[in-house]
Amino acid sequence: MNDGYMSILESIGSESPTPGGGTVAALTLAHAHSLAAMVSRLTVGKNKWHEGHLISNLIIDSSIESLDRAISLAKEDSLAFDKVMNSYRMAKSNDEEIESRKLAILQSTIGAAQTPLEIAEEGFKLLSLLPDLARFGNLNAITDLAASSELAYVAVYIASLNVKINVDSMSNEKLDNIQNNTTIILTKSEELIMLIREIVSRRMDS
């Protein structure tokens, strides 16, 4: 671990509200992608695991783009919440300022809910690939595959909490749609993680 990694952790642990849970969800997803790529590389390098080569190559081919997306979402989440806080600090000394502030709060809250929805979407995409890697990937790396899937699920779950806290703060159709989409993703992700856990357990016991 280098100083840059420690600096990120110290920033998360500071008294500043950003980076917070949404950013951590995206960083967690980045770790999940990295582990999935590692398991995939350990699979394509062995003829013994030829059944896992197709899914492994798919994961490897998309890993750099997926990692970049996760890191971008980590930054976007912090920026989105900063906009919410800034909107609440706006002046409200007259009717015009009050209306401008209300609009800014609404728009920034929608943005703060949209980013974790996108994190959840990305986590679900990765989880969708992992059952086949769990079935056919290198058995010697099965616990790393399990770790990747658990991290991807946790990223979806944390992201869903961040959506909920923003949606619950006000009533708006766009926010309701974001919540509905997030709920669907979380439900599907729960089904996937249960499936992957079952596959992992079966292969470890074989």
Image (tube, rainbow, N blue to C red):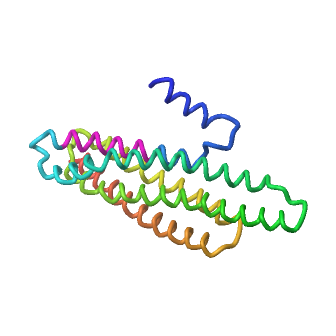
The residue sitting at the left extreme is 47
Residue 102 drawn at (x, y percent): 76, 65
Outermost residue toward the right?
A: 93
Most common secondary structure along the magenta stretch: helix
Name the residue located 55 percent from the left edge and 50 percent from the top edge.
76
Across and down, in percent, residue 41 comes to: 22, 40
Magenta stretch holds residue 171 = no
Is 154 rendered above or below residue 195?
A: above
Residue nearest the observer in this picture, 96 or 6: 96
Horizontal and vertical percent position of residue 45? 15, 39
> Which residue is outermost to the front?
96
Quadrant housing residue 14: top right
Which residue is depicted at the point 26% across and 42% down? 39
Instruction: Please tell me which residue is depicted at 44% across the width and 48% down the height of the picture.
Output: 70
Q: Is residue 44 left or right of residue 101?
A: left
Residue lying at 10% horizontally and 43% vertically, measured from the top left: 48
Quarter the N terminus occupies = top left
Inspect the magenta stretch and tell me whether residue 35 lies in it: yes
Left or right: 34, with 162 as reference point: left
- Residue nearest the observer in this picture, 72 or 130: 72
Q: In this view, does 15 lie above or below 192?
A: above
Report the label total. 0
List x then y, in percent, for residue 40. 24, 44
- Residue span colored magenta: 29-43
Residue 99 appears left or right of 112: right
> Can you say whether 69 is above or below 184 in the image?
above
